[in-house]
């Protein structure tokens, strides 16, 4: 395993972050793993040197956090744990979502209980709340840091101007600022290269992209994606413009390069993300130990400048996706 400093935090994390969206209950999504399989994945991740885990309160309505907390019991201090809030947790409680002070404090307390932890290393806002002034949210998050419930705070998919506004607000008010950005970025979705990624590089923000393999679109030939359990059930896959803007040709080029190298398509797609200097730790979500091991092996793949140019060449601009 390779390690890197997460942005300007000074905190060392593995170059891969294990995403825990796949832990919980298949009542939430058909492809989600139960407790035993989730714990097995965490155990293997730690054996492989991964020390960075990302979840969210909304994953399986809290079950993902509970399973991760149980899996890390007795070895919490060696790991870096990240979770998120924003999406409504209880349809009968409008204050169980959003980023008001009440929502942030209430959901943070619930996440700590489920994780079985006193402190969360990285607490992120899952999306931008258009109904709550960012100053209100940042004050609530800053208070959480002061109380020792949170070590660092981060953002997730939003417009670059919103992220800039948040950082400026923190600086102006003397509040803890966002130190990470968890955004949507992969070979077939590169719109973040226009503003967000250059801005993060300038500000010393740690970058931890979600869907580095395009929700499975870059892990197998395009025509085979629909045949997977997730491909059949995952409506979100089709909400993203992966098949547009040269996406199908990029898929074919990933397949060709993987065959030439004798590796898997997923490993080429992940290696491409890892070759981007601005990226600290892509978030890898998986439902099998084998795929987790494949992801770790991708760290050893060296792509030449010509390989990267070949993979990127068909890309064309696509609609912004993932902010809502």
Image (cartoon, helix red, strand yellow):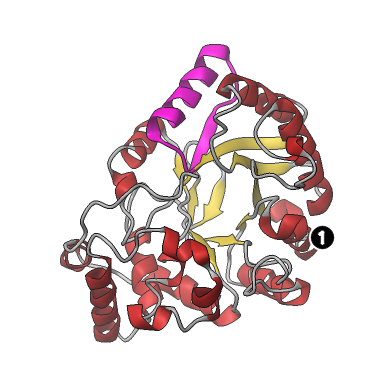
Start-end of magenta stretch: 157-181
At x 64% / y 55%, what residue is drawn? 55
Coordinates of residue 162 in the picture (x, y in percent): 44, 29
Which residue bears the numbered disc 1? Answer: 74
Foreground pick, 239 / 189: 239
Total numbered labels = 1
Q: Residue furthest top?
A: 172
Residue 170, visible in the rendered structure: yes
Foreground pick, 133 / 140: 133
Residue 65, visible in the rendered structure: no
Q: Is residue 324 left or right of residue 103?
A: left
Above or below, 281 relative to 201: below
Above or below, 31 relative to 177: below
Q: Is residue 11 left or right of residue 101?
A: left
At x 78% / y 53%, what residue is drawn? 115
| Quadrant of residue 202 within the rendered picture | top left
């Amino acid at each position: 395993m390779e390690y890197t400093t997460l942005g300007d935090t000074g905190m060392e994390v593995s170059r891969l972050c294990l995403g825990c969206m796949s832990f919980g209950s298949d009542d939430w999504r058909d492809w989600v793993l139960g407790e035993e399989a989730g714990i097995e994945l965490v155990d293997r991740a730690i054996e492989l040197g991964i020390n960075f885990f990302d979840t969210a309160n909304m994953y399986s309505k809290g079950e993902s956090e509970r399973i991760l907390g149980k899996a890390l019991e007795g070895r919490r201090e060696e790991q870096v744990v990240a979770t998120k809030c924003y999406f409504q947790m209880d349809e009968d409680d409008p204050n169980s979502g959003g980023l008001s002070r009440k929502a942030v404090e209430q959901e943070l307390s619930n996440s700590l209980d489920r994780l079985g932890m006193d402190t969360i290393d990285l607490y992120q806002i899952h999306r931008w709340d258009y109904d709550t002034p960012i100053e209100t949210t940042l004050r609530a998050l800053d208070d959480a840091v002061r109380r020792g419930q949170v070590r660092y705070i981060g953002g997730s998919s939003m417009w670059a101007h919103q992220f800039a506004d948040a950082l400026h607000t923190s600086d102006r008010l003397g509040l803890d600022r966002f130190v990470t950005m968890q955004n949507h970025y992969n070979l077939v979705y590169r719109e973040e290269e226009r503003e967000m990624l250059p801005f993060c590089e300038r500000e010393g923000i740690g970058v931890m992209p979600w869907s580095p393999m395009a929700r499975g679109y870059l892990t197998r030939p395009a025509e085979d994606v629909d045949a997977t359990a997730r491909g059949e059930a995952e409506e979100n896959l089709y909400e993203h413009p992966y098949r547009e803007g040269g996406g199908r040709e990029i898929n074919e080029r990933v397949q060709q390069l993987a065959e030439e190298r004798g590796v898997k398509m997923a490993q080429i797609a992940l290696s491409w993300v890892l070759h981007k200097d601005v990226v600290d730790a892509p978030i890898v979500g998986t439902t099998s130990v084998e795929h987790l091991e494949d992801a770790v092996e991708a760290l050893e793949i060296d792509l030449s400048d010509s390989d990267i140019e070949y993979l990127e060449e068909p890309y064309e601009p696509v609609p912004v996706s993932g902010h809502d």
